[in-house]
Amino acid sequence: MALHPGSTRAPRAASHWCVIAALGAGLLAACSPAESACAGPAATIPSSAHPGQTIKVPLENLISDCYDQGEGLANPVADTVTVTLFDGATQETVATATAPVDADARAVVKLTVPTDASGSLVIVYDGVTMGAVTIVPAE
């Protein structure tokens, strides 16, 4: 958007003009800033697990681009993703698993909790802590 001669006002980004006027119906709809933001990767983490148990960690929003202006589905980040399970106390890696990413940018990673695990284990994807699972003794 160009400035008018004599104007000192900076042009606004197109995303700030998210107002649609339906002139015939006299309607006015505005979108919030949150509607134009891309969601980051998200995971569903079980709250607890037993030593030796395999847990499923569904991941979504595994996208490489931010298509927030109606361009359609963004490209998945990769063909596969790797998730790491760390000991919450020692920060040592206790398990790593890889899973394929589907066309909807989702994956389900299966991690096996070590048989000697205790305390809390932290689940990390791409350097980001996705959550923690508390290890409870098997019944």
Image (tube, rainbow, N blue to C red):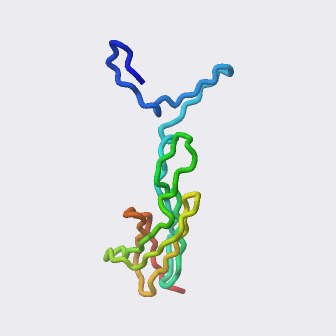
Q: Residue furthest right?
A: 25
Residue 106: name its quadrant: bottom right
Q: Quadrant of the C terminus?
A: bottom right
Residue 84 placement, left or right of 54: left
- The percent coordinates of residue 47 (x first, y second) are 50, 70
Residue 61: x and y in percent read 51, 56
**Residue at horizontal 52%, vertical 31%?**
18
> What's the residue at 59%, 24% (across, down)?
21
Q: Position of residue 56 (x, y in %)?
A: 54, 72
* Rendering coords of residue 118 (x, y %): 41, 81
Task: Compare residues 126 and 1 and report the one nearer the observer.
Answer: 1
Relative vertical location of residue 19 with respect to residue 8 in this rendering, above or below: below
Height in image: 94 above or below 1?
A: below
Is 35 in front, or is 11?
Answer: 11
Q: Residue at x 44, y 63 (%)?
A: 130
Q: Residue at x 36, y 77 (%)?
A: 93
- In the visual, does 96 lie left or right of 31? left
Q: Number of labelled discs?
A: 0
Does residue 126 lie above or below 1 as drawn? below
Q: If the image is split into quadrants, where does the N terminus sit?
A: top left
Residue furthest to the top in view is: 6
Q: Quadrant of residue 119?
A: bottom left
